[in-house]
Image (tube, rainbow, N blue to C red):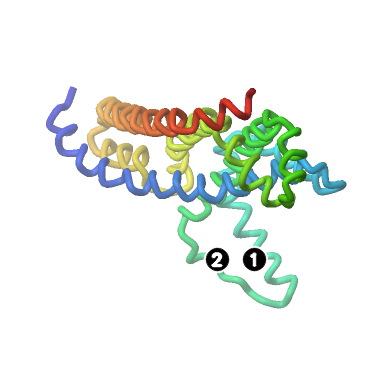
Amino acid sequence: MDFPFMLQALPEIIKAIPVTFFMAVAATAVGWILGLFIALIRRAKTPGISQVLAVFVSFMRGVPLVILLYIAYYALPTMIYSYGLSIGREIDVSGVPAILYAITALVLDQAAYSSEIFRSALGSVDEGQLEAAYSVGMTKTQAMIRIILPQAFAVAVPNLGGLFVGLVKGTSLAYYVGVYEITATAQLLALPKLNYIEAYIMTTVIYEVISIIFNKVFNVAENSLKRFRGVATA
């Protein structure tokens, strides 16, 4: 075991943690919002749109994340460029950083998985509460924001926490498209002397620490929302 290499490389790997966090937080923020809208539309059973979204969710959940990354990185720029030519404009996408393509793939992945979590959580809330809200003069939007969504979110938090932790680990695949996050940085540092065992041990420990921290965060959030969850499942 090359301990001097580990002591030298660890600070450089730690410097890549913000890149991993940025991808995870950005993909979560956008992906979960999209997932909630998808869940609401499918719950409303909007003709046509609901079926299209169901196909989208099924497709995204069936495609490996690494394939989505390749599609976003290689196919998306070509599609944008071809579309530009079709409207008589040449759109230059060569300057778009790889991390944006990676986040795009992660957003689509999160939107699909979180939509199923939200849809299940919304279904756990008693429909009678909507009728009660209407009886006291609330609109459908007010009832959804004040009554249904808080309870649904409380039910969804445990699964959303697991989804987020999985996403943090999933960002390691972004090195396939040239994003220098934790895993890519460790591999790059290990390359000169082939210290891959030491590099993978360090990345394993770092991901484990991150997972423990966020599991604790979501456990706290889950406990603080228990009163809403109790109403939803009553």
Q: Does the image show residue 90? A: yes
Please rate how many residues cluster around mark 1, counting C-alpha atoms within 10 Å: few if below 14, some from 14 to 19, many from 20: some
| Quarter of the view holding residue 76 | bottom right
In which quadrant is the N terminus drawn?
top left
- Amino acid type assigned to the residue bearing label 2 in the image: Val
| Quarter of the view holding residue 85 | bottom right
Where residue 40 appears, x then y in whole percent? 71, 44
Which of the numbered marks, if any, corresponds to residue 81? 1
Answer left or right for 143 relative to 224.
right
Where residue 182 appears, x then y in whole percent? 34, 40
User: Looking at the image, is mark 1 or mark 2 earlier in the sequence?
Assistant: 1
Answer left or right for 214 relative to 195.
right
Where residue 19 appears, x then y in whole percent? 37, 48
Which of the numbered marks, if any, corresponds to residue 93? 2
Q: Nearer the viewer, residue 98 or 122?
A: 122
Cα separation between marks 1 and 2: 7 Å
Answer left or right for 172 relative to 110.
left
Answer left or right for 221 relative to 204.
right
